[in-house]
Image: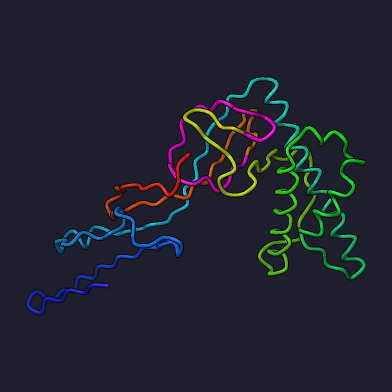
Amino acid sequence: MCILTCSRLGFVVECSYRWEVSPTKRGIPPCLSPPPYLSRKEKQRRTVTPMALKAHLIALDPNNKQATLLAKHCGYARVARNHALSEFKAALDRDEFLSDRDLRKRFNAVKDERYPWCRELSQNASKNGICNLGDAVKRWISKQNRFPRYKNRSGRSSYQADNGAGTVKVEKKRVNLPKIGWVRLREKLRWRGEIRRCVVSKRAGRWFLSVLVKVVSIVSREGGFRQCATGAF
């Protein structure tokens, strides 16, 4: 924190730099290091923001086979979530609380018998669907929203395709989705960095991909920024 005071003119200039450094890395990245000298006007204008999460919604251009697989994955995520919700409500009637981990174990024990068509699909869809249900239950417990409801086919179709940070690869105008392969994108990914989440959804008859990227950037108050990637893809 740096504070400059001028008694004659009667104003105070306050400038702050903040950065986050991974404990496994030594030193500060050059893109985040403050310059040795900045004018008072530059200190007022400039702010260093090292870590940020940026989202980009991109239209997909799948072929007929890929579009069918996308629809199946959305249905698989919906079925898994509804099955876990039924198990959770039945456990509540018995005064028993099931975590999302317990719900995933119970679903995996019966999915091959009750839903044999899911073998050709990525299990990330069911896993993330049940995890999202667990997040909804936590918000319900903290009274942030109402009790989770069942999803039906008439609602918005979507599923989370990733299995954690860095598990989905994007190259130029295409994305590699598990069990589906390379799917064309209408435009390039706007942000560079580590991909944290990928959600596929269908809106008004078109398929979209929502990508959440962790980036490092130096942002100014005037709106400009200089981006520094935390990872490469």
* Residue 178 on the magenta segment: yes
Stretch in magenta: 177-199
Taking 197 as reference, is 38 left or right? left
Q: What is the basis of the colouring in this image?
A: rainbow
Looking at the picture, does residue 99 appear above or below residue 210?
below
> How far across and how far down the image is residue 200, in percent?
63, 38
Q: Quadrant of the N terminus?
A: bottom left
Q: Quadrant of residue 91?
A: bottom right
The residue positioned 57% from the left and 49% from the top of the image is: 165
State whether residue 164 is above or below residue 66.
Answer: below
Q: Residue at x 42, y 60 (%)?
A: 25
**In the image, is 86 to the left or to the right of 26?**
right
Above or below 178: residue 8:
below
Question: Residue 56 location in percent, x, y?
Answer: 49, 41
Whether 46 is among the magenta residues is no
Q: Residue at x 73, y 55 (%)?
A: 133
Q: Residue furthest bottom?
A: 7
Find residue 58 and report its horizontal and vertical position in percent.
52, 34
Image position of 172 (left or right of 2): right
What residue do we see at 66% from left, 65% from top? Answer: 144
Q: Residue furthest top?
A: 64
182 over 189 or under it: above or below:
above
Q: Is residue 108 left or right of residue 67?
A: right
Image location of residue 117, percent across then percent down: 85, 33
